[in-house]
Image (spheres, helix red, strand yellow):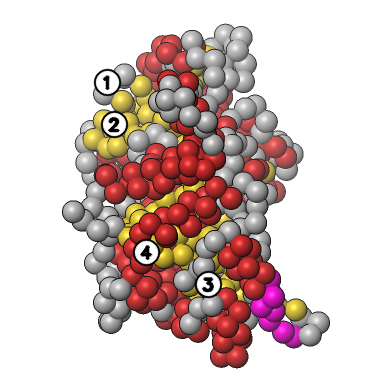
Amino acid sequence: MHTTRYIFVTGGVTSSLGKGIVSASLAKLLQARGYKVTIQKLDPYINVDPGTLNPYEHGECYVTEDGAETDLDLGHYERFSNEPTSQANNVTTGRIYQAVIEKERRGDYLGSTVQVIPHITDEIKYRIKLLSKYKDYDFIITEIGGTVGDIESLPYIETVRQMRWEMGNLCVVIHLTLVPYLSSTGELKTKPTQHSVKTLLEQGVQPDIIVCRTEKPLNEALRNKIALFCNVSSQAVIESIDMESIYEVPLKLRDEGLDREVLRKCGLPFEGQPDLKSWEEFLYKMKNPKYSVEIGLVGKYVELKDSYKSIMESFVHAGTYNQVKVELRMIHSEFLTQENLSEKLSGLHGILVAPGFGIRGIEGKILAIHYARTRGIPFLGICLGMQCAVIEFAQNVMGLKKANSTEFDPRTPDPVIDIMEQQKKISGMGGTMRLGAYPCQLMEGSKSRNIYKVPLILERHRHRYEFNNKYLEQFEQAGMIAAGINPKENLVEIVEIPKHPWFIGVQFHPEFKSTVASPHPLFISFVEAACLHLEQNT
Ligand code: GLN
């Protein structure tokens, strides 16, 4: 039987230290040494999945091929490793309890008292090991959300303790902490790290490796001090210094020997270095752009960068591919008005209208689309952004002044965007949208067909509303065409305006499929169009 090793990544002191990036970077390093790796996130909240969460809570909801609505860290995993994740890669406390309670109701526990230990911890263990059933992974990296010491994470830490006890050196625990810098005394402080390791020890877990997030380099004395207080060797104290780009983190952690320490703990050969040649080439291009283009990102969560994480990263990939820097101008759709429109959008080389739910900020999105369409500025509309492009076109080109989506105006005389028949019967909000990868047939001769260079694509969805086919002919006569169709359901997945230099709206989310190794063709082409727009306008 194949031997799988389990690496746990816990966090101490504070949240937002970048456990996701450390986990993704480690996956990249092990992968670059030839190992098969997957990453999983365990989230201690009670929501069954993050699909029902407002982006203000935990940022973007990331969607996998199999239609799971997951934590945004899975996006980092895919972007770093170029391997798809699935529902099994993100488990929440809500899902664990749901499964245990279902079993209890079925009578599976044969009359015994159902408890956190062993029933909840067994379910967590089962979910961790489940991944090895899909593929012969050499390593499963499990990131435990939250911070050690939180009430919510107790069952997860207890599970780590048990697995460690049962499996010995097939398990490695990495603890990520903060080493804060006190500017008043000019010192880095190790006390918070000592305390968080102590908390972990109280829960029965001795970390093998301490990764220290810091803004200043750690000196030898400091490393030794952390080693001494936390019972690890000083080579297992790894510095994770703030980097300009998240894509530099794997190289930095390689230089610090994170992968080497992991392999050493597992008793595997640790000589040599991972092969990161193409990663380094990517970084070189990213850091040496020929020039910049400016793209406007119009949405209603723009004040919170995590809400559009995958879109922003897709621009990093596509910009690097084109050897340009994409500067994003974040534009709050709620505050866009006819009066301030030119001031807010002037000078942009491309405009992207973001996905979203609900009526807030719709007017602003439609104004931005009108601006891009009438001025020949490259435009990409994603999901709600595509739907708004359809509404704008109906209102201003086809003369259907009251055209709308039934999401915003259930009584509109012209529901150009409407809820799907199957969706009408659904009342629950969790996991009930059109989710995950669906095929899309590209129309011969369309811009999209030329961009993708293949006739059939698979893209990920997350929405309830659709283009209303009753209006399709009218749209095509007026100059907006359906360039991509779901072959089975005949749903319009892509709209284009052939007379415009670059105007594409997609019902799906291309941003979920862009990775460092494989930047998304739509984003590449959109950035190319923005470069051309810049050239022609200077
Ligand atoms: N609110 C729209 C729908 O449900 C768009 C969703 C989205 O942008 N992800 O169809």
Quick check: is 320 in the magenta stretch?
A: no
At horizontal 62% and vertical 20% (from top left) the residue drawn is 408
With 327 as the anchor, is 257 left or right in this view?
Answer: left
Q: Which residue is mark 1?
A: 488
Q: CA distance from mark 2 to mark 1?
A: 8 Å
Q: Does residue 195 appear in this view?
A: yes
- Mark number displayed over residue 211: 3
Q: Is residue 189 magenta?
A: yes
* Position of 400 relative to 30 (above/below): above
**3 vs 4, front mark:** 4
Q: Position of residue 230 (x, y in %)?
A: 57, 76
**Which amino acid, mark 2?**
Pro
Which residues make up the magenta segment? 186-192
Which badge, 3 or 4, comes first in the chain's sequence?
4
| Residue 454, numbered circle | none
Q: CA separation, marks 2 and 3?
A: 42 Å
Respond yes or no on whether mark 2 lies under 8 Å from ligand 1: no
Mark 4 = which residue?
168
Q: In this picture, is 77 found above or below 416?
A: below
Q: Which quadrant would residue 499 be assigned to in this image? A: top left
Q: Residue furthest right?
A: 184
Q: Which numbered mark, 4 or 1, is in the foreground of this view? A: 4
- Residue 439 has which mark? 2
